[in-house]
Amino acid sequence: MSATTLEKLYSELDFAVLSVCKNELMTCLTEPPSWFKHFYPSINKNHQLNQEELPGFLQHFMFDAENHWQRKQPGQLKSGLWVEEAPDGTEWLMEATAVLVEDDRLLLINLTDKDHGTHQKKQQLMRENLLTKEKLELEVHRRTQQIREREEEIAIRLISAAVQRDEETGAHIRRIGLYSAEMAKELGWPMSHVDDIKLAAPMHDIGKIGIPDKILQKPGRLTEDEFAIMKDHSRIGGEMLAGSGISLLNTASIIANYHHEKWDGSGYPDGLKGKEIPEAARIVAIVDVYDALVHERVYKKAFSESKALAIMDEMAQDHLDPDLFAVFLSIIDRIREIKDRNQDEEI
């Protein structure tokens, strides 16, 4: 359909037709109807205006219209009626329609009826309130996502720094987070907490950054004194990550501090027992043991999964939370898939 034909059609239908550009500028494609000039005397054909010049209700509608255009939704999207006050104080009912014509984003504005009552005004107020609320919720979601991305960047950089000094592989670090997230989901944690443990769990050994190289990288068995120093990595990690006020880092601090506590109270640093140990730390203790057993390291060969699970079953009597270990076994197929997708490089 030609531009001339479209203009004639819109003129006959008594519409004001605005073409919307991606830079939020709008162009009036047709000579505006006489009633439109009554409200906007300065707008003529080919006149450009900014969306901020539109009535407040119509500015809110533009958020829905943009989604309609971007998704190339079929058909029309209507704004619903709103009340516009003319310079002489009279009030008229108007309605806008968003439509996509051959990739042109058009906004059609038409006059419906100048006679309206209290009911219509109340409806308009309700719509405006709902649109304002939706706009605020979208802004809150956008800002929350930005904060989350910054937190993730912090976590990734901290993990990268720790891995440089430890013998653990990057794949191991990644698997610990993925295993822990699967456990948390199975336990019914809120998704925000699942996301936290996914990034926090890989930081469980970050305190090793404070352990001397002669101990951390010693190829043989540690002496009693050396092991006492090595154990201090849990306290160092917990203190490094504590007190930020950021949920992700708070979870990481708890895991770093307590993932070597044992179910029977014989662990470190505080000798916590049973459910005194935070659940996040109990989860990481299980997945860390599993991953260490089923993978080869410079100091050991990999166990078969059946052998590893048998060892862990014995550990569930004293070292590991037996209830959480049962949950771990219930999702072993998902755990195995994560392991298989995130293999270590050849040693």
Image (tube, rainbow, N blue to C red):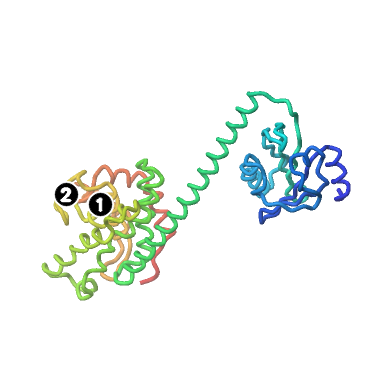
The residue under label 1 is which amino acid type?
A: Met
Question: Which residue is nearer to you in this view: 224 or 122?
Answer: 122
Q: Mark 2 points at which residue?
A: 272
Task: Report which quarter residue 92 is drawn in.
Answer: top right
- The answer to which of marks 1 and 2 sits earlier in the sequence is 2
Asked if 188 appears above or below 196 in the picture, the reply is above
Counting labels gives: 2
Mark pair 1, 2: CA separation: 20 Å
The residue at the far front in this view is: 88
Q: Which mark is residue 312?
A: 1
Measured as percent of width and height from the top left, residue 70 is found at 66, 50
Q: Is residue 266 visible?
A: yes
State whether residue 183 is above or below residue 13. below
Residue pictured at 66% horizontal, 53% vertical: 24
Q: Is residue 219 visible?
A: no
**Element type where label 2 sits in the image:** loop
User: Is 29 displayed left or right of 166 in the figure?
Assistant: right
Q: Nearer the viewer, residue 202 or 224?
A: 202
- Mark 1 crowd level (few <14, some 14–19, many ≥20, 10 Å Cα): some
Q: Which residue is drawn at 29% across and 69% down?
A: 166
The spot of residue 101 in percent (x, y) is 77, 47
Residue sitting at the far left = 224
Residue 269 percent coordinates (x, y) = 16, 56
- Residue 336 screen position, x and y as percent: 39, 53
